[in-house]
Amino acid sequence: MGKITLEKVVKQHWNNFSILSSLYSLSEKTEWDYKEHGAVIEALRRIDSTLEKKQNSEIKLYIADMSQYHIQLIVKHLCNLAEHVYYIEGKIDKKYLIYGYLFQKGEESRLKAI
């Protein structure tokens, strides 16, 4: 899979842009193994661990050099955490930094371009 064209995604969804729904729409059923995707898996485990402790979690994901496949894995996982995450929405800046907070359900979080 080549690199995702994030500019195209942003332009397409700029007026009503939801990172989770927009990127999730690109995804297909996938599986990963630790050897190939260890860094992504570790990042997701850290998110899980923080949420399990019922703490609000700041999340920063630099996705400029990630493949579309890696982005799909992250987005799918965040969607699976829907019972923990109340709301995530925002834009991607020119450096492709996704920045935001994961909150416990009932607290609102908005991604903010930096």
Image (tube, grey):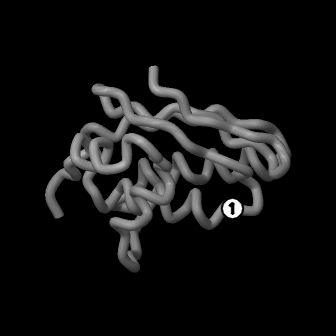
Q: Residue at x 67, y 48 (%)?
A: 87
Q: Which residue is mark 1?
A: 82
The x and y percentages for residue 55 are: 81, 39
Q: Residue at x 47, y 56 (%)?
A: 74
**Position of the N terminus by quadrant:** bottom left
On screen, residue 36 versus residue 108, left or right, reads left
The x and y percentages for residue 22 are: 41, 57
On screen, residue 1 versus residue 23, left or right, reads left
The x and y percentages for residue 61 are: 45, 37
Q: Residue at x 44, y 36 (%)?
A: 91
Residue 53 to residue 97: above or below: below
Work out whether residue 112 or residue 16 is closer to the camera in this orientation and state it: 16
Outermost residue toward the left in this view: 2
Work out whether residue 1 or residue 46 is closer to the camera in this orientation and state it: 1
The x and y percentages for residue 41 are: 49, 56
Residue 61 to residue 75: above or below: above
